[in-house]
Amino acid sequence: MSVQKLKKSQKDIAVSNGSVSAVVKKAFKKNSSWEDKDEFLDVIYWFRQVLAIILGIIWGLLPLKGILAIALFALINAGVLYIYFTNFQKIDEEEYGGPWELTKEGFMTSFALFLVIWIIFYSAVHFP
């Protein structure tokens, strides 16, 4: 067995073992292959959580409030994830139940996290 094949095989073992660093590398690498569907769904889930924290902080620092802020969060959250899995990862959506299944994966938990972060930052910045 050649050295290259051995290194590739070791890489595949590390990924199949689910090491976090390997999954993160795959998540940021364009057109990664996702043999384990749950692994990709986990990436989608955690990407949403990070996005919710970032948007919650931004919405809290800016004086955004009301239904407009919530709708804007939903559009950005769904849009960014849709672009990620269609254009960046170029996965076959039908393997995961269609684009709607991927779009709603982890949405409610990210929405709840967004609301908590948004309220905390908005209250801290805009109230004495």
Image (cartoon, helix red, strand yellow):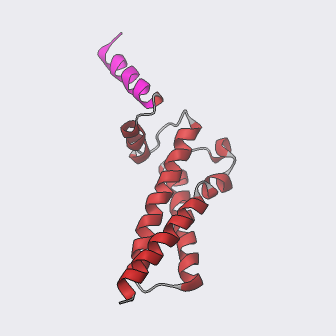
Furthest residue toward front: 128
In the rendered view, tell whether residue 63 sits above or below residue 25.
below
Q: Main secondary structure of the magenta part?
A: helix
Residue 61 colored in magenta in the image: no
Using the rendered image of the protein, determine whether residue 79 is visible from the camera's viewpoint: no
The residue lying toward the viewer, choosing from 14 and 79, is: 14
The residue lying toward the viewer, choosing from 113 and 55, is: 113
In the rendered view, tell whether residue 85 sits above or below residue 5.
below
Furthest residue toward bottom: 128
Residue 30 placed where, x, y %? 43, 45
* Total numbered circles: 0
Residue 61 placed where, x, y %? 37, 80
Check the picture and name the quadrant holding the C terminus.
bottom left
- In this rendering, would 102 be left or right of 6? right
Q: Residue at x 49, y 47 (%)?
A: 43
In the rendered view, tell whether residue 43 sits above or below residue 67.
above
Q: Residue at x 42, y 24 (%)?
A: 13
- In this rendering, would 110 be left or right of 19? right
Q: Which residue is drawn at 41% across and 67% down?
A: 54
Q: Residue at x 52, y 39 (%)?
A: 39
The residue lying toward the viewer, choosing from 64 and 12, is: 64
Using the rendered image of the protein, determine whether residue 27 is visible from the camera's viewpoint: yes
Furthest residue toward top: 1
Which quarter of the figure has residue 60?
Answer: bottom left
The part of the chain drawn in magenta is 1-15
Residue 9 placed where, x, y %? 40, 20
Check the picture and name the quadrant holding the N terminus.
top left
Which quarter of the figure has residue 107?
Answer: bottom right
